[in-house]
Image (tube, rainbow, N blue to C red):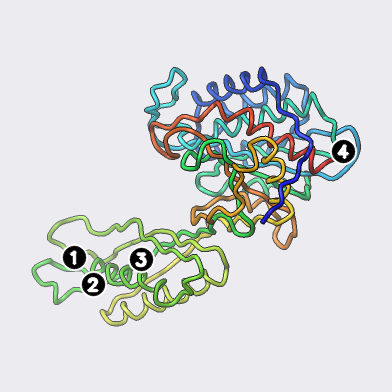
Amino acid sequence: MTVLSATRVQLIDAALAEQASKWRQDLHQIPELQFDLHKTQKYLISLLDKWQLTYDLGYGSTGIVVTIDGQNAGKTIAFRCDMDALGMPDESGKPWASLHEGVSHSCGHDGHMAVTLAMIKHLKDNNNFNGTVKVLFQPNEETGQGAKAMMDDGLFAMHPYSELYGFHNMPRLDDGTVQMRYGATTGAGECFSITITGVSGHSSVPHKCVNPISVTGEVVNRWHSLVEEHIDPNEMAVIATCKLNSGSTFNGIPEIAVAGGTMRYFEAHVADQMREHMHRIAKEVCDQYGANYDLNYEVLCPATVNTTEHVDAVARCAAEIYGEENINTNVPASPGGEDMQFFVPQGSDMGVCWYMVGTKGTNLHTSEFDFDDTSIRNSASLMANIVYARLA
């Protein structure tokens, strides 16, 4: 169990938190999708220019890397902030509701940006630390591709860092709590697509056909039982088939059926086992009925893996702001995906902590969602105090 000892704490100014609320509401009105975050980027840059801060563009199309130097030389730590919205309507009923039809900040990334901006402004005015802070404003978190795109564009070569921190608002957690865990925290994800080819024909003579829909159904049913039958119950393993496309008429058996979905896990060896059994089952069923299959995978994101020293550091800082009784370092790991781990170079022993802040409101990814502005001051203060603790 973590021992939460006192650390020097600076709360950001209440007036700055109030400003950040206005920035959040401005950003809520201009939600954008995936990499096309041009209005969002322009809004952020306008503030960075006003504050005379150094930033770099050209990573992941619309990503921004902000640099904040302390008073003396030292190591470099980084904070990740996601920027993109979701393709769903805004039914929050707020005066600052989305101006972009069918697009909304229903995951709270507008709030993440506001919190991070407040931290940046505070550190600009109170840079009594040794070293450098990098802020990675990231596009396209929702499809798990943004962090990878920024790294592919040479982010780490130009802006190296030795520690990485990130957070997410979580209305499903108790308001005013900070929760995290040691080790694997969010699941790795892969999407799969299987194409099964049968023999088409008229629905009146199914015995002369090989119906790819029936074959696909049997494959999928057996896939969903393979986790229980073949994967250690102590391991996290999920296979979810989420779509099936086939046929164009009610009286003709099609030639092809295409199914797709996701698989999730914490450990790479579990993924290897799932892929092996999925191929085996698909082959057995197709051989039985005289069909053929093609099965492909695409990595969505690796598991986010928190390191002990850095979970301890965040917990200590959070305890001084939220109260020790409101800090949980043993929250259950989530099978949901999170692409922050792409910001950790492969083979690196970089320190990482991804944590969750409990907030008020409806759950994420709902049309009624609106970020809880009352959480901004403490959330930004926690980020600032991580800097002061790690760059003392």
| Residue found 29% across the figure and 65% down from its top | 256
Residue at the disc numbered 4: 130
- Separation of disc 4 and disc 2 at Cα? 69 Å
At mark 4, the secondary structure is strand
At mark 1, the secondary structure is strand
Is the C-beta separation of discs 3 and 4 under 8 Å? Answer: no
- Separation of disc 3 and disc 4 at Cα? 56 Å
Few, some or many residues within 10 Å of mark 4 (<14, 14–19, 20+)? some
Q: Nearer the viewer, residue 272 or 245?
A: 272
Q: Is residue 313 left or right of residue 302?
A: right
Q: Is residue 131 left or right of residue 192?
A: right
Residue at the disc numbered 2: 199
Q: Identify which amino acid the numbered label 3 is placed on.
A: Thr
Mark 4 or mark 2, earlier in chain? 4
Is the C-beta separation of discs 2 and 1 under 8 Å? Answer: yes
Q: Is residue 89 left or right of residue 146?
A: left
At mark 2, the secondary structure is loop
Q: Nearer the viewer, residue 246 or 358?
A: 358
- Report which quarter residue 207 is drawn in: bottom left
Mark 1 or mark 4, earlier in chain? 4
- Report which quarter residue 193 is drawn in: bottom left
Is the C-beta separation of discs 3 and 2 under 8 Å? Answer: no
Residue at the disc numbered 3: 195
Residue 262 percent coordinates (x, y): 43, 59
Q: Identify which amino acid the numbered label 1 is placed on.
A: Ile
Disc 3 vs disc 2: which is toward the camera?
Answer: 3
Disc 4 vs disc 2: which is toward the camera?
Answer: 4
Residue at the disc numbered 1: 253
- Separation of disc 1 and disc 3 at Cα? 15 Å
Disc 3 vs disc 4: which is toward the camera?
Answer: 4
| Residue found 75% across the figure and 59% down from its top | 349
| Residue found 82% across the figure and 39% down from its top | 132
